[in-house]
Amino acid sequence: MDHVAIVTGAGSGIGRAVAVRLAAAGTGVVIFGRRRASLEATAAMMEGEVIIHPGDVRSAEDLNSAITAADSLGGVSILVNNAGIMPIAPMVTSSIDDWRDTLEVNVLGALQTIHSVLPGMRERGRGHIVNISSVAGRNPFPGAAVYSASKSALDAIGAGLRAELAADMKRGGPPIRVTTIAPGAVTTELVQSIRDGDVRAGTAAYYDAMDAPLTPADVADVVMYAIEAPPHVCICDLEIRPTEMIR
């Protein structure tokens, strides 16, 4: 196949919408996430070559197994790093376990996924890594200090990796692009990962009060815009918000 993608967090929301769009464009897709039933629901919406691969981005074994599955389609040329959680709460009442989970999934999980796909991309001479960040990483809001820090870290990881790969390309290395996409308020299941009942209710009310939050399909459109740019063009960093969103 011309392209093979791995999409993490593909069981719902942005990951599902991106996987559907990639498959419709003729890309072979490995959909990766923790819930098999949700991945099966995603696969039912997709066309073409699809591999369901349950797993956790915190597990190197799970990721390496997904890479092996992708090799059966021709090897990964696109990674969409979408898996993430948002157990936000005021720091004074928040749980250290929530902080640890946030950093392990949103930061170390993304790093581990990049580490798993990068050698194969270099060997095959091409690749595109798309990291799904958040405007929260650039505009922290009350209760989201650690979540915002995790997304700010993902921004820095993307920028640093892009600089490293560009320098490597000047020395004869392969053209591997890195794109960071930071959405604002999107209607996804992410709110369900908020464990503080009051904060979850307040966040849901914030979304409900919006006339038109972003949809997962909106974000998928932007991902495809970056991926479908000519090979010599790297869409480095995109921030998208609902028009009515102030910050």
Image (cartoon, rainbow, N blue to C red):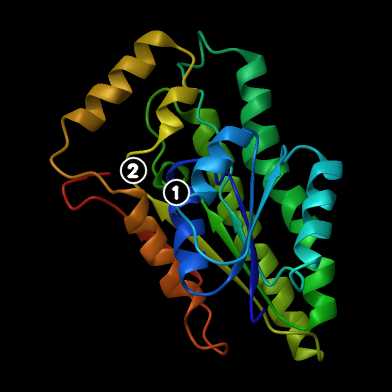
Residue 42 percent location from the top left of the image: 50, 47
**Residue located at (16% from left, 47% from top):** 244
Name the amino acid type tagged 2. Answer: Val
Q: Which residue is mark 2?
A: 186
Residue 140 percent location from the top left of the image: 41, 37
Q: Residues within 10 Å of mark 1 (few under 14, many from 20)?
A: many
Residue 13 percent location from the top left of the image: 43, 43
**Residue located at (51% from left, 10% from top):** 92
- Give the quadrant of the C terminus: top left
Q: Which residue is mark 1?
A: 14
Q: Secondary structure at mark 2?
A: loop
**Residue located at (39% from left, 65% from top):** 222
Instruction: Give me the C-alpha separation between circle 1 and circle 2.
Output: 9 Å
User: Is 148 left, or right, of 157 in this rendering?
Assistant: left
Name the amino acid type tagged 1. Answer: Ile
Q: Quadrant of residue 85?
A: top right
Residue 208 percent location from the top left of the image: 20, 29
The answer to whether mark 1 and mark 2 are in CB contact below 8 A is yes
Above or below residue 44? Residue 77 is: below
Above or below residue 208? Residue 26 is: below
Number of marks in picture: 2
* Relative depth, front residue between 109 and 61: 61
- Residue furthest out toward the left: 211
Q: Which of the two discs, 1 and 2, sits closer to the camera?
A: 1
User: Is 210 left, or right, of 113 in this rendering?
Assistant: left
Nearer the N terminus, badge 1 or badge 2?
A: 1
Above or below residue 176? Residue 158 is: above
Q: Residues within 10 Å of mark 2 (few under 14, many from 20)?
A: many
Q: Secondary structure at mark 1?
A: helix
**Residue located at (67% from left, 79% from top):** 1
